[in-house]
Image: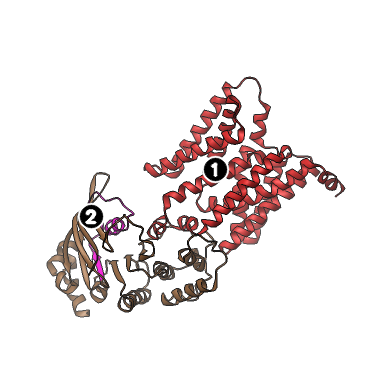
Amino acid sequence: MSILSVENLCVKANGHHLIENISFSIKKGNIVAIIGPNGAGKTTLVKAILGLMPVETGSITIFGEPAGKKNYGGRVGYVPQRIEFDRTIPLTVSELLGFSVPPVYSLPLFKNRSEKRHIDWLLRIAGAQGLSQRRIGSLSGGELQRVMIAKAIVNGPEILFLDEPASGVDIEGQEKFYDLVNRLSKDDGLTVILISHDLNIVYRFADNVLCMNRRLICTGRPAEALTDDVIKSVYGEMMGGYIHSCHEHD
Amino acid sequence: MSMISEFLAYPFFQRALISSVIVGILCSYAGCFVIMRRMAFFSDAIAHAAFAGIAAGMLFNIDFSVSSVAVALVIAALIAYLSEKTALSHDTTIGIGFSAAIASGMLIIGALEGYRGDLFAFLFGDILTISLRDILLLSGTGIAVLSTLAFCFKPLLQIAFNKDLAKVEGINVRFFEYLIFLVIALVVTVSLKIVGIILVTSLLIVPAASAKNLASNMRQLFTLSAVFGVVSGIAGLTASVYLNTPSGPTIVLVSIGIFILTLFKRS
């Protein structure tokens, strides 16, 4: 069953096409990787789906309904590539996660027990236990990403959008992060849409890949869709040999 | 001490004390949002818009409370609209609103007949002339503003943290952007009589900034900010009696003194 489908999507900014005529659909419970070179429109695509960027033409259907008609609420989680925020705000991890716990309209300064238990559980799932009382601005890149994924799954979403979530995180941190994403998808049936430059990660974790460079280049299972010719056309001649090493690694 | 006891017997001083406590709490709470959203310049623009509103009230014989809030809200809406609809940066749109407020205020003052000393009372503030009606207005606005901030605490802080994440989580960012502009416009306008247009931004910014120096979480930020706001008000007013100095600037200087102390504690 398709949880998300995009038909003939075009996105323009300042008179230039950022995305041209892209169509695809994503099945529930799949991990789908979006790959492409810098400036290919990957982040734009995710932002357009999430309603963070205006769509020029085309349609997006999410949960069987046209996007933008309804508030997705907690059904969608999002971890952006870079989280821009004021690092000097005295905001703790626990407080940040508490903002997303219903009821929305309540004073969160005094948490009830169930909210506290829920936050502790989220942090444990995300491998971020012990960070509860830390200030957000004092977290390392890897710690912040784990907290952001805890925030993204706070209300048990059905789709999780991850925009290069492990960039700037060390190798051990990346491993932990993608293991977590994989576990959430396999155990809870969470659909994950993941932007990544790391083909190794794509081969290991993605059920399907969507390769784009403003237009859709190919889509399918990574081992079948990412041929040598596709990789060369997207990333250039230098990447030709890389595809073989990824296959062998796999 | 006897001097203070003597002053406490006077109704005008009692009213001044009550209003300094209300404004201290109100400004310090709203100030936390102002510093988190980096809106200090916005509150300055709103203060000047309120001044233009007061001048307009004098010209057209309208109640100052109504005219100042009305003009402040128009300028706040103009800034919010420009920020949303244009590619201009936030400080540029505030600068445009600020210029519109000052220029129209100067034109209106030019149209007033004779010397208007009462207008200048709003420029520098005069807490000792606070009437019972002013206190009722302050209390009403205070209850409305604090209830709104408490009720919408989570979405407002979500937006202050990151607008995109807030939007994805289903928060109506546009509505809350206008709401916080409206709240700050109201707080600034009702606080004008206490410290005046020139210093009202200080009451918003300084207690919240002092609290930020010490706080390690949001609960501490809001609590300390309110404590510093109230202490500045009471201590500033008391000091102004002893030192025979204008109350508005004395209150602000006390809050600056607290800020300096928090810097030492922080380091």
- Residue B145: where, in percent of width, then height? 57, 49
Numbered label attached to residue B122: none
Q: Nearer the viewer, residue B57 or A210?
A: B57
Q: In the rendered structure, does residue A51 fall within the stretch colored magenta?
A: yes
Residue corresponding to mark 1 = B185
Farthest top residue?
A: B113
Residue A1 against residue A105 in the figure, above or below:
below
- Residue B40: where, in percent of width, then height? 54, 46
Q: In the rendered structure, does residue B192 fall within the stretch colored magenta?
A: no
Q: On the image, which quarter does residue B86 sit in? A: top left
Helix, strand or loop for disc 2: strand
Q: How many neighbours does mark 1 have within 10 angstroms: few (below 14), some (14-19), or many (20 or more)? A: many
Residue corresponding to mark 2 = A59
For chain A, the rendered hue is brown
- Residue A101: where, in percent of width, then height? 46, 66
Q: Which chain is red?
A: B
Range drawn in magenta: A31-59
Query: Horizontal placement of B209 versus B169: left or right?
Result: right
Q: Residue at x 13, y 69 (%)?
A: A228
Query: Label 1, label 2: how many angstroms apart (C-alpha)?
Result: 40 Å
Q: How many neighbours does mark 2 have within 10 angstroms: few (below 14), some (14-19), or many (20 or more)? A: some
Q: Nearer the viewer, residue B149 or B136?
A: B136
Q: Which image quarter is the C terminus of chain B in?
A: bottom right
Q: Foreground mark, 1 or 2? A: 2
**Does residue B263 appear anywhere in the picture?**
no
Q: Nearer the viewer, residue B258 or A122?
A: A122
| Three-letter amino acid code at the position of disc 1 | Ala
- Residue B5: where, in percent of width, then height? 84, 48
Q: Residue at x 64, y 38 (%)?
A: B196
Which chain does the numbered disc 2 sit on? A
| Three-letter amino acid code at the position of disc 2 | Ser
